[in-house]
Image (cartoon, rainbow, N blue to C red):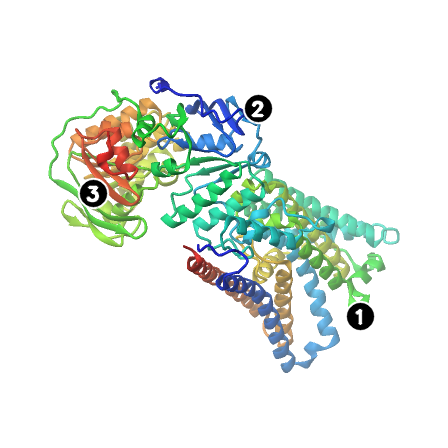
């Protein structure tokens, strides 16, 4: 390394940084571009796609998935995974529905939200304790709780279903009305996304999540409370799944025991497509939400284009593979570039 | 064992009247039956660079981990400014101003350099937010003080080891560390990088920082440090000023042991050449390695950790590829990068890390022994349990393995017995050439003698043995010839009669042989 003072920054270092930032921005930008192309093509074929109701539907459908993706991002950033979120949504949607239906007049939206978030948080706490303190691999733990919670859901449901007529109108309004034509659901999701995104970027404890995912060993040596943060990530993911469960109930009104069954994989796909590295340490909640939006838009577009729904799954899978491949290739390229840059400025 | 008496020892350099910033007093630490540190004392003074010398396994790393709160001493105390302290973790030691730079720094590759520096204690703005502007300014200022051009905003991924160490030093500086511990920081650096590191460390020391420096390169110790503490077998040997010492004095303090019946070496007459390695090179790892091993001969490959010995063994066995040169077993050339071909030619490798590479820890003893020879225990296409068991019983008896049932998982065995299982596994292939990498590391003294007896017997039966060992007495006690590696090259070949601890250590530390006593 030459004895340059840090005042006159070497151009190569500058370039390296710009490049890395560009790569991360590029992920979000390319998602936006992909969504735009998809929307334009579909609208060209069938203009109904861009009708007020069509757009509203896409946002409503995205909201719940995106909310779960925000929670999942936090977990994945710490190099873990939460497969139980789909089951939690199902459990919360049904038990909150049952709870409200028992006394449709007296129990309001706030009580429902508190109840739902509490159930979700309890599930998250269980996951978090098992992963962070009992040191069981996250994949196994959350696969187990996926089935346990699903079983619990079926036990409570007993084959019954919750009907919209039994629910308080205020709750149904939450799922389908809005302010100034903008539905509540996307507003809630965007608010949560902005808050979490800001927290992760600007607070020391938020940076800890990235540190843990980037190098657990270094995090421990740097005095980061690794277990507490991992526990917090699961707690938060569970609580958001609880919120999503209440919103699911509000949106659809009629629920049976296995709402959101299989959604855990959709959520993980959204997160990975959104640029959160499955090995942790990298990614933003904005990307994850865009990933959710892209997956939902594909689903709606294929329906409008009258393509068999089988293709939706195949396309989601292909997108996932593409995202992971691009991540891998970019990571290798960027590392090589950074290394070359440091060598050039090294001794 | 405990014989630190032969070197007279002043009690640390008396630097004025201030108490040492950080000190160990009569510290002992055991891991199971292994006593890693026994009654070790050490004093670090402000503005002074102190070296820690000792062979591999002398307890240096344990000592560092005790100073930095990773281990807690079983006996004795850690003193900070003359007062006893108990660090209940690495964070507590950092809080107290103790910073460590490891050989391989631990950074967050995905985060920026400045985030790495301030992780865990970022400057705050209003509402507890991270004050990014201050982070940037302070990081820039730190690098200016260190006189290095690193962009604080770039990610840590892709930084050279030398630059990563500078980030670690910047971290230490930002914590206003009063003690800087460097555990073999120069092992992976080039000459220029070492010079830059030293100038930075020198500046810190002048600022009043206490420095503890660990290196296998004696010239570096003499260049940087004013005083030195030597450890041997976990025991304290001496703490003294460096000015009165010669490199040979230091080597003698590090190795001064005597040999005994631990090494039952049989006299053998070497037969024809079994293994020929010529001009073997793997770029950046080892260069131009040539030697041969004859039937009935035990050849030791000595050198310091990181000299490239295990890498040579792995290349010979075909685990890693080589870039140039050739390997011949019994006159037939081996293809590069094929363990299967190496095994077929009669090579066997007992690897360094038996838990990771040598054994399947959860599998039973018999299964582990049978792994290398599944073909010979087959009945038709199916592995025969009975044949597997017979073979395991046979080898267990021959190696005097201590076990309850052959069906027990190997992870319930002691380290020494695990090592016997690995040996059995490879001996069952009836090798012509046996390569053993650190055959007795971490096993008790009794089993160690048995392993030595076994190696000697095998050589007696005409097997060519290549033994990699960091245990000097073992090398001297067992080998017919000693090859010494230093930084990826063979630096010496010493016949049994001429091999002494001094001559081997001299070659291993890369000093000219004529300087040996």
Name which residue lies at 61% across and 74% down.
A38
- Residue B461 in percent (x, y) is at 16, 31
- Residue B451 in percent (x, y) is at 27, 28
The one of B175 and A85 positioned closer to us in this rendering = B175
- The residue under label 3 is B346
Residue B38 in the image: above or below residue B156 = above
- The residue under label 2 is B84
Horizontal placement of B276 versus A162: left or right? left
Determine the secondary structure under disc 1.
Answer: loop
Which chain does the residue under circle 1 lie in?
A: A
Q: Which mark is residue A181?
A: 1
Determine the secondary structure under disc 2.
Answer: strand
- Real-space CA distance between mark 1 and mark 2, rounded to the nearest whole angstrom: 68 Å
Q: Quadrant of the C terminus of chain B?
A: top left
Horizontal placement of B292 versus B105: left or right? left
Q: Residues within 10 Å of mark 1 (few under 14, many from 20)?
A: few
Q: Residue most toward the front?
A: B16
Q: Quadrant of residue B448?
A: top left
Q: Quadrant of the N terminus of chain B?
A: top left
* Residue A79 visible in the picture: no
């Amino acid at each position: 390394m030459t004895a340059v003072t840090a005042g006159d920054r070497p151009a190569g270092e500058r370039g390296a940084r710009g490049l890395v930032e560009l790569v991360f921005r590029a992920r979000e930008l390319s998602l936006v571009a992909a969504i735009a192309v998809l929307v334009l093509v579909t609208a060209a074929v069938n203009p109904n796609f861009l009708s007020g109701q069509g757009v509203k539907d896409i946002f409503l459908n995205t909201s719940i998935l995106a909310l779960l993706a925000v929670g999942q991002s936090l977990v994945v950033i710490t190099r873990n995974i939460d497969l139980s979120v789909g089951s939690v949504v199902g459990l919360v949607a049904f038990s909150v529905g049952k709870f409200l239906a028992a006394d449709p007049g007296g129990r309001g939206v706030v009580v429902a939200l508190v109840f739902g978030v509490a159930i979700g948080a309890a599930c998250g706490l269980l996951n978090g304790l098992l992963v962070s303190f009992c040191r069981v691999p996250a994949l196994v733990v959350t696969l187990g709780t996926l089935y346990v919670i699903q079983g619990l859901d079926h036990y409570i449901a007993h084959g019954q279903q919750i009907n919209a007529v039994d629910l308080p109108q205020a709750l149904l309004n939450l799922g389908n009305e809005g302010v100034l034509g903008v539905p509540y659901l996307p507003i809630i999701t965007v608010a949560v996304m902005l808050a979490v995104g800001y927290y992760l970027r600007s607070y020391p404890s938020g940076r800890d999540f990235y540190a843990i995912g980037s190098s657990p060993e270094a995090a421990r040596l740097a005095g980061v409370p690794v277990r507490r943060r991992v526990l917090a990530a699961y707690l938060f993911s569970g609580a958001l799944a609880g919120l999503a469960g209440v919103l699911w109930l509000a949106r659809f009104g009629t629920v049976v025991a296995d709402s959101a069954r299989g959604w855990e994989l959709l959520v993980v796909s959204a997160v990975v497509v959104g640029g959160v590295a499955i090995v942790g340490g990298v990614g933003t909640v904005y990307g994850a939400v865009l990933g959710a939006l892209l997956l939902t838009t594909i689903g709606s577009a294929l329906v409008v284009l009258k393509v068999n729904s089988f293709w939706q799954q195949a396309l989601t899978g292909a997108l996932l593979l593409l995202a992971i491949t691009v991540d891998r290739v970019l990571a290798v390229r960027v590392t090589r570039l950074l290394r070359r840059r440091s060598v050039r400025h090294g001794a | 064992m405990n014989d630190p008496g032969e070197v007279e020892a002043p009690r640390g350099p008396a630097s004025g009247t201030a108490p040492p910033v950080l000190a160990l007093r009569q510290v002992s630490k055991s891991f199971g039956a292994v006593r890693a540190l026994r009654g070790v004392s050490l004093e670090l003074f402000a503005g002074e660079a102190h070296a820690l010398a000792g062979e591999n396994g002398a307890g240096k790393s344990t000592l560092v981990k005790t100073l930095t709160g990773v281990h807690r001493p079983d006996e004795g105390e850690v003193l900070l400014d003359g007062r006893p302290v108990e660090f209940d973790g690495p964070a507590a030691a950092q809080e107290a101003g103790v910073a460590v730079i490891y050989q391989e720094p631990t950074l967050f590759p995905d985060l920026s350099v400045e985030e790495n520096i301030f992780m865990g204690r970022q400057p705050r703005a209003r509402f507890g937010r991270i004050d990014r502007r201050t982070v940037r300014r302070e990081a820039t200022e730190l690098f200016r003080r260190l006189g290095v051009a690193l962009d604080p905003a770039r990610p840590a991924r892709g930084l050279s080891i030398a630059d990563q160490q500078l980030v670690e030093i910047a971290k230490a500086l930002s914590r206003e560390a009063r003690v800087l511990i460097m555990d073999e920081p120069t092992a992976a650096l080039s000459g220029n990088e070492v010079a830059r590191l030293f100038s930075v460390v020198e500046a810190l020391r002048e600022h009043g920082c206490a420095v503890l420096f660990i290196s296998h390169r004696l010239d570096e110790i003499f260049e940087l440090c004013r005083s030195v503490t030597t450890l041997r077998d976990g025991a304290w040997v001496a703490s003294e000023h460096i000015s009165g010492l010669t490199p040979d004095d230091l080597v003698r303090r590090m190795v001064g042991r005597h040999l005994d019946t631990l090494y039952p070496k049989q006299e053998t007459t070497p037969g024809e050449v079994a293994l020929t390695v010529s001009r073997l090179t793997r770029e950046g790892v080892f260069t131009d390695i040539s030697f041969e091993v004859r039937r009935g001969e035990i050849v030791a490959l000595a050198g310091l950790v990181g000299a490239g010995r295990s890498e040579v063994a792995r290349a010979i066995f075909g685990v890693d590829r080589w870039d140039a040169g050739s390997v011949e077993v019994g006159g037939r050339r081996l293809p590069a990068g094929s363990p299967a071909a190496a095994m077929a030619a009669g090579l066997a490798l007992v690897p360094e890390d038996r838990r990771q590479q040598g054994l399947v820890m959860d599998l039973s003893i018999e299964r582990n022994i049978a792994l290398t020879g599944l073909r010979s225990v087959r009945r038709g296409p199916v592995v025969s349990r009975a044949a597997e068991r017979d073979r395991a019983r046979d080898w267990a008896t021959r190696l005097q393995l201590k076990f309850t049932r052959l069906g027990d998982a190997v992870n319930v065995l002691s380290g020494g017995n695990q090592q016997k299982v690995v040996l059995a596994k490879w001996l069952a292939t009836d090798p012509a050439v046996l390569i053993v990498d650190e055959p007795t590391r971490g096993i008790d003294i009794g089993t160690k003698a048995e392993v030595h007896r076994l190696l000697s017997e095998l050589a007696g039966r005409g097997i060519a043995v290549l033994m990699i060992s960091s245990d000097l007495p073992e090398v001297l006690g067992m080998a017919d010839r000693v090859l010494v590696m230093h930084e990826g090259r063979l630096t010496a070949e010493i016949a049994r009669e001429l091999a002494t601890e001094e001559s081997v250590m001299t070659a291993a530390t890369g000093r000219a042989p004529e300087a040996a006593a």
